[in-house]
Amino acid sequence: MTTHIIALGGSLLRPEESDERSAWFGRLRQLAVHLEGNGRKLGIVVGGGLPAREGITLARSSFTDSYRLDMVGIAATRLNASILQQTLLDIGCDVCPIIPTSTDEAAELLGEHHIVIMGGTTPGHTTDAVAVALARDSGSAHLVIATNVSHVYDSDPRTNENAKPFETMTLAELAEITGTEALEPGASAAVDPIAVKWAMEAGLKIAVLDGRNLSLLEDALEGRPFEGTLIQ
Ligand code: UTP
């Protein structure tokens, strides 16, 4: 049975417009039902998005220890994971009722359920790295990182209008852009450097695409050409 591992950026759960938000959740439900109906397994790792940023900012006014700030971020990822878990349980999908706290546990639970949804695990990385670890532990050769940019770029497209998108690249090329040192709590990058490091160690392929348009995610999961960056 095919198992798909998806890192779903937390920012995707809260597009600014509420209309877009309901449309996005509707499309996600449809995709989950379709994939489950075709006998696929889904391991979804949800990011912390806005609650993580808010929580970490709030906590920083009281303490600065990175480990503790990361723990606050992890709580936010688990909050978002619960929202998605309850959404899919609500329409009768075979979703694991537990939110696992490790990728070992999640890989095991994928043996019992079609869909397992989780957030972060331990301090020192983001949910991108958790998705890489889950792909490794569940024997998947690839994973999809669904985020809110269209591609990996050679520099930050928010600050450099000449930034060039990659259609394909190697993990070594990606590591040159991201580095392999852990990010600060709450800091964001195209792909988490620790995720890149672990993907190199495990020899995994990664697709990075814009998860605001879930048709792109479906294309990648169905093995069709997709708009985004293929990293191998
Ligand atoms: P995210 O995975 O949400 O980071 O984790 P992100 O890259 O900002 O992703 P988006 O914006 O949701 O797409 C949020 C924070 O939670 C802590 C880190 O501090 C991270 O910055 N975290 C998360 C961990 O320490 N360990 C984890 O396994 C996951």
Image (spheres, rainbow, N blue to C red):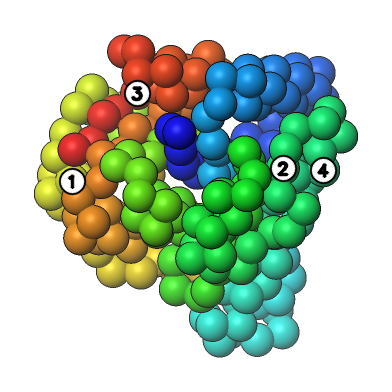
Badge 1 element: helix
The answer to which of 36 and 85 lies nearer the viewer is 36
Q: Which residue is mark 4?
A: 86
Work out how far the residue at label 3 is from the one at label 1, CA to CA, in angstroms.
15 Å
| Residue 132 coordinates in the image, percent (x, y) | 38, 53
* Relative to 69, residue 226 above or below: above
| Label 2 or label 1, whichever comes before in sequence order | 2
Q: Earlier in the sequence, mark 3 or mark 1?
A: 1
The mark that comes first in sequence, 3 or 2, is 2
Image location (x, y in percent) of residue 87? 81, 36
The amino acid on which the numbered mark 4 sits, given as a three-letter code, is: Gln
- Give above or below for 2 relative to 173: above
Q: Which is closer to the viewer, label 2 or label 4?
A: 2
From the Cβ of disc 1, is ligand 1 less than 8 Å away? no
4 left or right of 77 in image? left
Q: Nearer the viewer, residue 203 or 129?
A: 203
Question: What residue is shown with label 2?
Answer: 95
The residue at the far right in this view is: 90
Q: Would you name the residue on which mark 3 appears?
A: 228
Mark 4 / mark 1, whichever is N-terminal: 4
Compared with residue 11, is residue 189 higher up or lower down, i.e. above or below? Answer: below
- Quick one: label 4, few (<14), some, or many (20+) residues within 10 Å? some
Q: Give the residue at mark 1.
A: 171
* Marks 3 & 1, CB-CB < 8 Å contact: no
